[in-house]
């Protein structure tokens, strides 16, 4: 067995207690959940993963464990009936999209991620962009962010990642750069998201002036049961505007809730913000020709190859009357889809889908779907009953005694299947814990750096240097190494600000969790 410390990868591992689950079982792999094949779906007997994530979901009461600070607004989505210049029915049978001019009511919640319920909205942080469509087929939630990618690609890492963003568990000191960069420095797949969060886009000028993205890869299903992979993009008609760190500090000196206030003020003034919804489509397969995996949420799909195609427009025109029942208790989840929309095997998406409704049964209560803001605007007839704060039983069709199905004496019946067969992938693979094969952690981050305008690069470097100056040297060096791996100039400039050169970091071996491609090994050998 190779001695980790002697490779020079992580001398700080020595002497650390071994990670276990709550049953006292050692955790041998804390990076990859068990899936069917390296890219495949997760399984339910996955005790370590389920224990870890269920426990995480129960860490806070009553505020959201993430995205606690946020604001809801209401409006409508109007469909084009087309996707770009093609009829949308070619790709999805989802009814809300089919007819030009069809309007669907929506509730949207914008949020920051890391801070508590009344923390500052001027934090450098991704913004949540969660839309609930109250469709004629029941609810559809599209739970995304404003940056288009994410820090990690496997849901099993989410609790660790969020802990690194939250206050110290001993001192409760908040905004500790060293905690966040300790994790980032050990997480190469985070570099793309780091390049965005520390750029001007990490501090939007308002919720109205930011984009939204579904981030994870979903599927569309047409009437023939054929599927395509899809990514969602919301483009603000108001344009995209950002603040510098100085702008943010000036606003924060006046108020912690400037973005919420901006939304209330503009809607009260009749200045209704709106976003176009566009999608990118890809055939539903592994795409071996691409240098990334289409199910990897740390990647964007190049728009020149997978063009944006418009499907409709959303407008917000009304604000909540009660923050608690409409903003605090609103509950979104990635599992909430309607016919014609489907999941992919994206390992984040599958983990998220368990996590959202799990946390909401705890945070809001098992009857959270009976609350007006969460309740679909179509009839809901179930045989579910009881539980804390039950708001009564649903309509069970004339004979209230029959709370079961099937029955010859009354009650509810099953719906008739649509004309197609149940659509689902054929899955075949060994149960395993493995990274996806095409990680390519640095290329898109480096390209993004190169494509940035000069002022954006300057802002990125200054923001990163400012945060990294608060970190210990080994974290600084590892981060500079990652930046060099993305793009020489980026590594050079952040390094200069920290007094670290390419020579200082060239000898660093890859992380234990990393397998560099030949090209990446070449790059590591010639950094700078
Ligand atoms: C909120 C889990 C990744 C966007 C939440 C909440 C949980 C959670 C537990 C609180 C929900 C509530 O209390 O109602 C996870 C897990 C993830 C993950 C386990 C990874 C496996 C992501 C990603 C995005 C995202 C990649 C963006 C694409 C959001 C948004 C909210 C949220 C927007 C706030 C929803 C609201 O406004 O109520 N997440 N999340 N999450 N998450 Fe995630």
Image (cartoon, grey):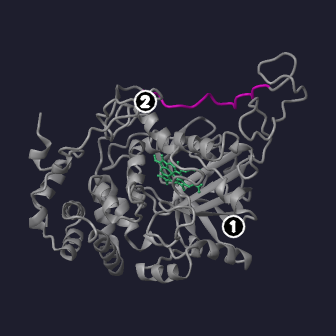
Q: Residue at point 34% right, 65% down?
A: 177
Give the x, y percent position of residue 348: 44, 44
Q: Which residue is mark 2?
A: 46
Secondary-structure class at tag 1 = strand
In this rendering, the label closer to the viewer, 2 or 1: 2
Q: Could you tell me which quadrant the N terminus lies in?
A: top left
**x 74%, y 31%: residue:** 384
User: Looking at the image, which is closer to me, 236 or 50?
Assistant: 50
Q: Which residue is mark 1?
A: 316
| Marks 2 and 1, the one that precedes in the sequence | 2
Front in this rendered view, residue 365 or 516: 365
In which quarter of the view is residue 202 placed? bottom left
Q: Quadrant of residue 381?
A: top right
Q: Residue furthest front?
A: 171
Mark 1 neighbour class, 10 Å CA radius: few under 14, some 14 to 19, many 20 or more: many
> Eyeballing the image, is 38 above or below 323?
above
* Mark 2 and mark 1: Cα distance apart in space: 41 Å
């Amino acid at each position: 067995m190779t001695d980790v410390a002697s490779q020079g990868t992580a001398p700080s591992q020595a002497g650390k207690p071994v990670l276990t689950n709550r049953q006292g079982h050692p955790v041998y792999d804390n990076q990859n959940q068990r899936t069917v094949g390296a890219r495949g779906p997760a399984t339910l007997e996955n005790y370590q993963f389920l224990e870890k994530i269920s426990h995480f979901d129960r860490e806070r009461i009553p505020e959201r464990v993430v995205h606690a600070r946020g604001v809801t607004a209401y409006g409508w989505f109007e469909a084009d009936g087309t996707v770009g210049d093609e009829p949308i029915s070619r790709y999805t049978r989802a009814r809300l999209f089919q007819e030009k001019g069809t309007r669907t009511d929506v509730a949207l919640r914008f949020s920051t991620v890391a801070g508590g319920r009344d923390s500052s909205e001027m934090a450098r942080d991704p913004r949540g962009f969660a839309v609930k469509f109250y469709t004629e087929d029941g609810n559809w939630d599209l739970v995304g962010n404003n940056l288009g990618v994410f820090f990690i690609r496997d849901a099993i890492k989410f609790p660790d990642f969020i802990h690194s963003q939250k206050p110290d568990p001993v001192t409760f000191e908040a905004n500790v750069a060293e905690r966040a960069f300790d994790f980032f420095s050990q997480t190469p797949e985070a570099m793309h998201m780091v390049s965005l969060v520390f750029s001007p886009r990490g501090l939007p000028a308002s919720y109205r002036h930011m984009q939204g993205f579904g981030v994870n890869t979903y599927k569309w299903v047409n009437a023939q049961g054929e599927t395509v992979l899809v990514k969602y993009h919301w483009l603000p008609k108001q344009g995209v505007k950002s603040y510098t760190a100085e702008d943010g500090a000036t606003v924060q000196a006046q108020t912690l809730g400037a973005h919420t206030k901006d939304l209330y003020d503009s809607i009260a003034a009749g200045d209704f913000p709106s976003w176009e919804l566009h999608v990118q489509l890809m055939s539903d397969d592994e795409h071996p020709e691409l240098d990334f995996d289409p199910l990897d949420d740390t990647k964007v799909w190049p728009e020149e190859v997978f063009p944006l195609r418009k499907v409709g427009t959303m407008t917000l025109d009304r604000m909540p009357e009660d923050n608690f029942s409409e903003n605090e208790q609103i509950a979104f989840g990635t599992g909430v889809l309607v016919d014609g929309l489907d999941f992919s095997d994206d390992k984040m998406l599958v983990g998220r889908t368990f996590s959202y409704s799990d946390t909401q049964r705890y945070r809001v209560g098992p009857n959270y779907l009976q609350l007006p803001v969460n309740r679909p605007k179509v009839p809901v007839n179930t045989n579910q009953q009881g539980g804390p704060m039950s708001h009564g039983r649903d309509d069970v069709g004339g004979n209230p005694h029959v709370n079961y199905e099937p029955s010859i004496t009354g009650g509810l019946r099953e719906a008739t299947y649509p004309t197609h067969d149940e659509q689902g992938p054929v899955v075949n693979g060994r149960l395993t814990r493995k990274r996806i094969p095409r990680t390519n952690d640095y290329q898109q981050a480096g390209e993004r750096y190169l494509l940035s305008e000069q002022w954006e690069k300057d802002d990125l470097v200054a923001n990163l240097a400012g945060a990294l100056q608060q970190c210990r040297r080994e974290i600084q060096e590892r981060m500079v190494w990652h930046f060099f791996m993305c793009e020489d100039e980026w590594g050079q400039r952040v390094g200069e600000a920290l007094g670290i050169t390419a020579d200082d970091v060239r000898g660093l071996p890859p992380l234990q969790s990393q397998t560099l491609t030949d090209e990446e090994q070449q790059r590591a050998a010639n950094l700078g």
